[in-house]
Amino acid sequence: MKKSVYHVTVVLAVVALMTPASAIFADDEGDWKDMKQESKRMKLDETAEEAMQALFAENAKAKELYDGSFGWAVFDNLKIAFGFSGGGGNGVAKAKESGHKTYMKMGTAGIGFGLGANKYQVIFLFQDSRTFDNFVNKGWQADAGATASAGEHAAEVKTGFVNGIAIYQMTEMGLMANADIAGTKYWKNDKLN
């Protein structure tokens, strides 16, 4: 009897926790689907600008890397976990000198312990044109060792470019230290370009 009460309690707790996450996802998804292409591009540009400014405010080293970079990309993501995890989002990549923008998508999936929803932005800085062009034109998949690294404390970051890319992850709480982006794929969004 105690075992079945425990199972019912766990199931109800899971449903209660997932309902708000599902509602958040459905609201965002519905709003996005209802937007026209130009509105989507404007929203992505606005989100990218806000994420970049928040990053620079928290991390002077990121601003230094940006100043010496060829270009950047920012993705706005929503990840939901319930034993299995999955997520998706959209973003924009920009070559600094030309100002040319490429709109992109991302997706992630995994298995592991997790429960709930997480909204965040991933910011990429690209050291050179070759790395940027490969990312934009061929897409990119984060391997098992890929992390968005802010160091132990965001204000004390000592990171730099690794294979031509520096990666940061921002949440509503600020810059995350060592956020895992493994298993995430990035590619062009043909509908927005």
Image: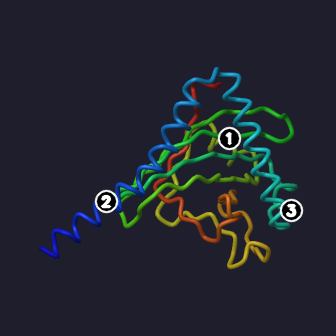
Which picture quadrant has residue 149?
bottom right
Classify 118 as above or below 91: below
How packed is label 2: few (under 14 Cα within 10 Å), some, or many (20 or more)? few
**Apparent side of residue 187 relative to residue 109 in the rendered image (left or right):** right
Q: Which amino acid type corresponds to the residue marked 1 in the rendered image?
A: Asp
> Which residue lies most toward the left here?
1
Q: Which amino acid type corresponds to the residue marked 3 in the rendered image?
A: Glu
Residue at x-position 86% and y-position 62%: 64
Q: Residue 62 at what x, y percent from top left? A: 80, 62
Residue at x-position 73% and y-position 53%: 125
Q: Residue 177 at what x, y percent from top left? A: 64, 71
Determine which residue is flagged by label 2: 12
Of callouts 2 and 3, which one flags the residue occurring earlier in the amino acid sequence?
2
Determine which residue is flagged by label 1: 133
Q: What element does badge 2 sit on?
A: helix
Determine which residue is flagged by label 3: 64
Q: What element does badge 3 sit on?
A: helix
Q: Nearer the viewer, mark 2 or mark 3?
A: 2
Q: Which amino acid type corresponds to the residue marked 2 in the rendered image?
A: Leu
How packed is label 3: few (under 14 Cα within 10 Å), some, or many (20 or more)? few
Classify 133 as above or below 111: above
Q: Nearer the viewer, mark 2 or mark 1?
A: 2
Of callouts 3 and 1, which one flags the residue occurring earlier in the amino acid sequence?
3
Which is more toward the observer, 57 or 64? 57
**Apparent side of residue 65 relative to residue 134 in the rendered image (left or right):** right
Q: Quadrant of the N terminus?
A: bottom left
Res. 91 mark: none
